[in-house]
Amino acid sequence: MRVRYLIIGNSAGGIGAAQAIREVDKAGSIAMISDEPYPSYSRPFISKYLVERHSLEKMLFRPADFYDQNNIISLLDRKVDSLGWESRTVELDDGRRIGWERLLLAVGGVPIVPAVEGVDKRGVFAFTTLDHAKAIDKFLDNAHKAVVIGGGLIGVSATEALAKRGIEVVIVEMKERILNTILDERASLIVEETLDRADIRVITGQTVTEIAGAPKVSEVVLGSGEGIPCDLVVVAIGVSPRIELTLGTDIKVNRGIVVDRHMATSHPDIYSCGDVAEAYDFVYDTNRLTPIWPNAYVGGRVAGLNMAGVETEYPGGTSMNSLSYFGLDIAAAGIVAPPDEEGYEALTKQTNESYRKVILKDDRLVGMVFVRDIEKSGIVFGLMKDRVNVGSFKQAILDDDFGLAFLPEEIWRPRLEASLGRG
Amino acid sequence: MGCHLCEVYCQVQHSKSKDLIKAFKRESPRPLPRLRVETKDSISFAVQCRHCAEPPCVYACLTGALHKDKDSGIVTVDVERCIGCWTCILACPFGVIKRDTKQGKIVKCDLCPGEDVPACVVHCPNEALIYADVSGEDING
Ligand SMILES: Cc1cc2nc3c(=O)[nH]c(=O)nc-3n(C[C@H](O)[C@H](O)[C@H](O)COP(=O)(O)OP(=O)(O)OC[C@H]3O[C@@H](n4cnc5c(N)ncnc54)[C@H](O)[C@@H]3O)c2cc1C
Ligand code: SF4
């Protein structure tokens, strides 16, 4: 088989690309490959699956007939074993070869496995795929206590799901506070208080030295020597870019696959996006990993347009997260804690109800944290993304009634007028 | 002029009874307005969903609940698929997506399906709101 467009990975990035290609090229053949057995589903939704055991249909990111409707060949439960970057082919795990003219590597990440004794025991799970959620679900009937290793987004997401299933959960975080990469200290503290009220024990500043039990886990042992009895362990210490297919090729890889502003790799007909790619971050003004869903989708979209010959520039992304766990809503993006350097300015406002903070550099927004009252966060994020000089109204940004009207008219008027984009 | 009537009529339009008195007095929860009137000094204008050509909310949606209709261009939410993650709220540069925290779903402008002209425009006493299909002046100082 030979196709014009081959997309490896059938998730946010892959779908973003496929849809963009079909907008501008109705005829060029497209094939999508995934080693997961499901049509594209919402990965962040797996925590809700664990709570409510939704049907697959409800978890799908696009309707079941998406592939037929868009004339896309979909190969599920098939792994690409190797990439012939010079011959322009890939080889599948069933021995088949597929030729391509343009290739997208939207292959995402793999959960990091810590070098700890006992991680291969029965009852130890990762939490990044629907199959992981299903495996945990099956295990829960006879479980009462869980330890979640890692207090990042995925760990907290797993924690909420387990707690809702009636499991007693302890989170173990190696750093001093949970969600330390996406929140500032105060917001982390608010989350920890919220978890505490939900009877979740959070242990910070501790590493796990052993997962004990035979043959099934029965205890997690910490660096302090404390043993935490448990029936299952969820390992959520992070995800690393799945760069395996680039090994032995000429494709430039740093921590992830390096792409330019067209989402092209160092090979002109191979593109990449999403969790595996190091793409432009407009806050840091350099390429970085930003493993979040919206950036995967937009990066995929830009890759798709360029693959189809419509030159499009990636506007850049940055870390942006909206969390809604245990009834606490938080929106955060960019640099959330100013580095210890000259030139950064932090403005904060705290009431009983809410906490808001923005970080500025040279009167441009570079970071934000909004806790509880998040409805205006998008306006602030928009100003950050467009690198607007907010010097003349920065004091108003954290006000309750802040809105577009606070911007100079030469900023709000064109914004309101230009974006009327129906059609 | 900052009368907020567009917000009121948006709520009525999206209420069960579609009656102003009943919607405000008896309906619980009272529907949320899907647009926002902003006022500062002498300026006042209504901000509603722009149904963006390249909609950041749709591109940010984690579940596929937000969708831009190919033909009409209208950006709508399928509440069945919305899980209330609020990622779209952070993505929308106009701040026009609201949280319905009771239902755990977002609420946004749908341009009043079934009506020729959206309720906010129909009821604007100042004729400041204008409904234009692709582009046009719909703001008023
Ligand atoms: C529990 C959880 C909660 C999350 N919550 C949020 C959130 O709230 N907000 C947010 O923005 N992000 C969230 N994320 C992150 C988000 O899911 C990812 O950023 C997003 O899925 C990245 O999309 P992607 O297309 O780059 O790759 P992925 O979604 O990782 O998909 C890559 C696909 O490619 C397949 N693949 C890889 N290699 C091969 C191969 N060789 N052959 C065949 N197939 C292959 C993989 O199996 C996978 O299906 C969450 C993630 C998890 C796990
Ligand atoms: S909700 Fe916001 S981002 Fe989405 S289409 Fe409307 S204005 Fe654009």
Image: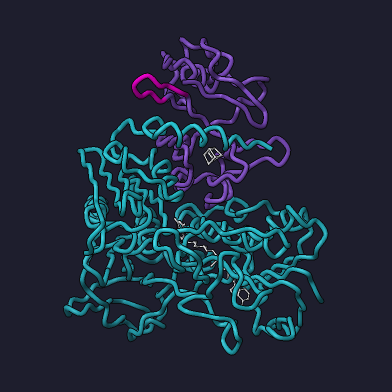
Chain colours: A cyan, B purple
Q: Main secondary structure of the magenta part?
A: strand
Quarter residue A268 falls in:
bottom right
Task: Please determine whether, in this image, residue B89 is positioned above or below residue A187.
Answer: above
Q: Residue at x 63, y 63 (%)?
A: A303
Q: Residue at x 54, y 61 (%)?
A: A296
Quarter residue A308 falls in:
bottom right
Task: Please determine whether, in this image, residue A250 is positioned above or below residue A271.
Answer: below
Q: Is residue A183 magenta?
A: no
Residue A112 % position (x, y):
42, 77
* Magenta segment: B38-45
**Would residue A414 be seen by someone viewing this image from the given angle?**
yes
Quarter holding the N terminus of chain A is bottom right
Quarter holding the C terminus of chain A is top right
Quarter residue A260 falls in:
bottom right
Task: Please determine whether, in this image, residue A290 is positioned above or below residue B122.
Answer: below
Q: Is residue B41 magenta?
A: yes
Q: Residue at x 48, y 58 (%)?
A: A317
Number of on-image labels: 0
